[in-house]
Each structure stands twice: as structure tokens, then as C-alpha cells.
Image: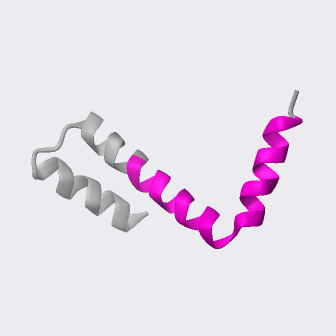
Amino acid sequence: MVVSALGTVGMLEAGFSIAEIFLSLGVLNAVIVGILFMLLPEFLQRFAVWLRFKH
């Protein structure tokens, strides 16, 4: 939490806008999810089945 707060302060001081900070966090989150699904493919399969039978 402290690292992310310092990173946000650093990005704000570097001239990033709030929207750009949210965009960078979203992209970073998508990259991490992709890596996790590659390392643990059964979770991707479970998620796909859950989405299919959710309704």
C-alpha cells in the first residue's frame, strides 16, 4: 500500500493526470491477470464455466 501511494505521488509529480494513472493501473492489472491465467489455466477454465452458467 505504501509503495502504491509513493508510486502515485511520483506519477502526479511527473505530470500524469488522474485519468492516466487509472489507465496505467488498469493496464498493469490486465497484464497481471494474463500472467496468472497463463500460469494457472484451470482458473481461466473455471471462470469461463462460471460466466457461461451464471444466468
Where does the C terminus fall, quadrant-wise?
top right
Q: Quadrant of the N terminus?
A: bottom left
Residue 52 in the image: state x and y as whole percent. 83, 36
Q: Residue at x 34, y 41 (%)?
A: 23
Residue ID at (47%, 53%): 29
Residue 25 left/right relative to 30: left
Residue 26 x, y percent position in the rendering: 42, 46
| x then y, percent, for residue 11 | 19, 53
Q: Does the segment drawn in magenta span residue 15? A: no
Vertical placement of 17 versus 38: above or below? Answer: above
Residue 30 falls inside the magenta stretch: yes
Residue 18: image x %, image y %? 26, 37
Question: Who is closer to the viewer here, 26 or 51?
Answer: 51
The residue positioned farthest toward the bottom in the image shown: 39
Q: Nearer the viewer, residue 21 or 43?
A: 43
* Residue farthest to the top, as pictured: 55
Q: Quadrant of residue 5?
A: bottom left
Residue found at x 77% / y 46%: 48
| In this rendering, position of residue 45 left or right of residue 26 | right
Q: On screen, 26 above or below 37?
A: above
Q: Residue at x 40, y 55 (%)?
A: 28
- Identify the magenta region: 27-53
The figure's colour scheme reads: one colour
Query: Which is nearer the eye, 9 or 39?
Result: 39
Magenta: main secondary structure equals helix
Q: Is 3 left or right of 1, judged from the image as shown?
A: left
